[in-house]
Image (cartoon, coloured by chain):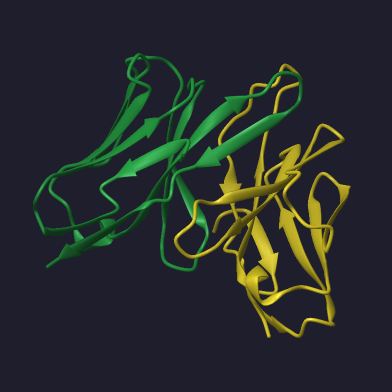
Amino acid sequence: SQELEQSPQSLIVQEGKNLTINCTSSKTLYGLYWYKQKYGEGLIFLMMLQKGGEEKSHEKITAKLDEKKQQSSLHITASQPSHAGIYLCGADRRGGGSNYKLTFGKGTLLTVNP
Amino acid sequence: ETGVTQTPRHLVMGMTNKKSLKCEQHLGHNAMYWYKQSAKKPLELMFVYSLEERVENNSVPSRFSPECPNSSHLFLHLHTLQPEDSALYLCASSFKMSSGSQYEQYFGPGTRLTVT
């Protein structure tokens, strides 16, 4: 089973609409990262959440971490075509010692129609 | 401008070829990573070089061989690849504390590899 489940897998919205993307972990979260990727390109770091209840915002994008539910949500307000892309969540898996591992969800493809 | 560069951006190679992917970071980070991104699959961590230590995903075949000569440069040597190895290979870097805590990873633009 997938360690990080993202929902929805894809999303099409009209410009100006709000939307939410969810990321749920099957294991304990020590940190949660959100990235955006244009197709075939590298990932752009958006936000990192480390504490339960933490909420961060950047321009029109807000991310929250619910540590108890092992879940994070990414909310975009008044979406614009520039928000289109693939949104990926990544989880910090502290394996002990130096066995660090960052795992990712499959991503959510966002399309914003003008 | 991400501060992490990768070359080449695109590579087509036959199964008997030997090639290398290069990654360079200009961010003063002390950890570097190789990821593989295939269609319909999550981003897969292949190798980590951190604080002079190498950590690898045991499921990565030996036909992939990483090299990290210093904290700014990372290579992925490819040898006798298979068509299923075709994917986008992403390099990333971050700053990692000796305690294990680390800051966010910054990614390069990737190398699109096609194995024929």
Q: Residue furthest front?
A: A1
Q: Is residue A100 above or below residue B24?
A: above
Query: Across the whole image, how many numbered discs are drawn on residues?
Result: 0
What residue appears at the point 79 percent right and 54 percent down from the top-left corner? Answer: B74
x then y, percent, for residue B79: 85, 71
Q: Quadrant of the C terminus of chain A?
A: bottom left
x then y, percent, for residue B18: 86, 77
x then y, percent, for residue A63: 30, 32
Q: Is residue A95 above or below residue B67?
A: above
Chain letter for the part of the structure drawn in yellow = B
What residue appears at the point 68 percent right and 30 percent down from the top-left corner? Answer: A100
- Left or right of A79 on screen, residue A68: right
Chain letter for the part of the structure drawn in green = A
What residue appears at the point 67 percent right and 23 percent down from the top-left corner? Answer: A95
What residue appears at the point 87 percent right and 35 percent down from the top-left corner? Answer: B52
Q: Nearer the viewer, residue B28 or B13?
A: B13
- Left or right of A112 on screen, residue B115: right
- Left or right of A2 on screen, residue A108: left
Q: Nearer the viewer, residue B104 or B116?
A: B116
Q: Is residue A48 above or below residue A16?
A: above
